[in-house]
Amino acid sequence: MGPETVKPRHIIEFVAFQFIAFLVQLLPLSVVRKMGRGLGRFVYVRIGYRKEVTLNNLRRAFPEKSETELIGIARGAFENIGISLLELAWFPRMTRQEILEEMRFDNPGILKNAYEKGKGVICLTAHFGNWELLGQALAVRFQYPLSGLAKTQSNRLVNEQINRRRKLFGTKVIPMETSLRELIRALGDGEMVMIAADQAAPKENVPMEFFGTMVPTHTGPAALSLRMGSAIVAIFAVRSSDGSYDAHLIEVPSEDLEGHTDKNVVELTRRHVKITENIIRQYPDQWLWMHKRWKHVPLPETHSGEAGT
């Protein structure tokens, strides 16, 4: 389904989005990031939106950590989202040169070599660091045709503003509702597609181990890779201490998997899920822990007591 009919609350949300975007674009990026950190901290401490979801997810993923450690990660995750949201609002001010300065790529040859094979590249990422800025930087740094798979927001007005930002440097947006045909076309034309496949999948999907728990997982990227002969390159934008990013590129090995079989799809999915888990373990406060990734799995009683702030 597409965006809903515009409702009064959608207009209010749109006006608020535009007003915030106008204000932050008057400020230097360093100040915007400080504001974003404060916004995330305020939401976590004062509003508590999905605070318990976040902490329960962390308890599941890191049973060995103390409650104090988990609370620290949770706060950091909210701060990261606050920063990313205000950076998104600030995007129209960014020049190509500023994007290159804000996003450094290690091992860019991995993506270059994959692209030059001519069979398309699946740039697999996660809701980690600032994945929206990563899409902009991919388009600017490599200048290869790029399409990004995106969920359509229920607020059509806000959705249009977000997509306008995504398209600033030539990236095409593929709505999830019409994704398969467009993804096949793009890969068939030898283009790059960017997919974040780390969120909850339908209950009937293939279960895959993620942070020690078997959880339904999206197998679409692996299926596309094996069907089209496209390489999967995992890419994650890691926020550094000064607010800029280092993009880590990792090719997901698939040379030993011959043919588009169910077994190979599961194995290739397992490989890229493990790579995603590893990067999250290294930088746990940069992932979207407030998402209900384990909603189809009962919560284990690994921690007791009430979470503090």
Image (cartoon, grey):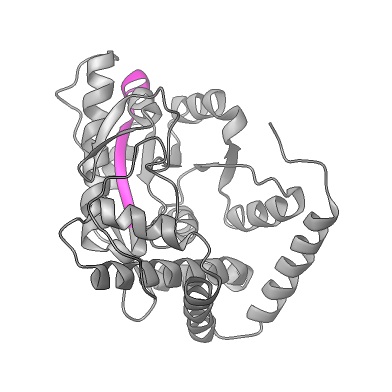
Q: Residue furthest right?
A: 8
Based on the displayed image, in which of its 4 quarters is residue 77 positioned?
A: bottom left
Residue 119 left/right relative to 7: left
The residue at the point 33 percent across, 66 percent down is 285
Task: Give the total number of marks visible in the rendering.
Answer: 0
Q: Position of residue 264 (x, y in %)?
A: 23, 20
Split into 4 quadrants, where in the image is the C terminus? bottom left
Res. 288 visible in picture: no
State the image coordinates of residue 31 (x, y, percent, origin top left): 52, 86
Residue at image coords 64%, 51%: 163
- Please indicate whether residue 6 sits to the left or right of residue 297 in the image: right
Quadrant of the rendered structure where residue 4 is? Answer: top right
User: Does residue 33 appear anywhere in the picture?
Assistant: yes
Residue displayed at 43% across by 31% down: 190
The answer to whether residue 288 is above or below residue 3 is below
Q: Which one is nearer the viewer's eye here, 252 or 49? A: 49
The residue closer to the viewer here, 281 or 117, is 281
Q: Position of residue 205 (x, y in %)?
A: 38, 24
In the image, which residues are magenta? 226-236
- Image quarter hosting the N terminus: top right
* Residue situated furthest front in the rendering: 305
Q: Is residue 304 above or below residue 235?
A: below
In magenta segment, residue 113? no
Estimate the x, y position of residue 223 in percent, counting from the top left: 35, 23
283 versus 203 height, above or below:
below
In the picture provided, is 65 more to the left or to the right than 43?
A: left
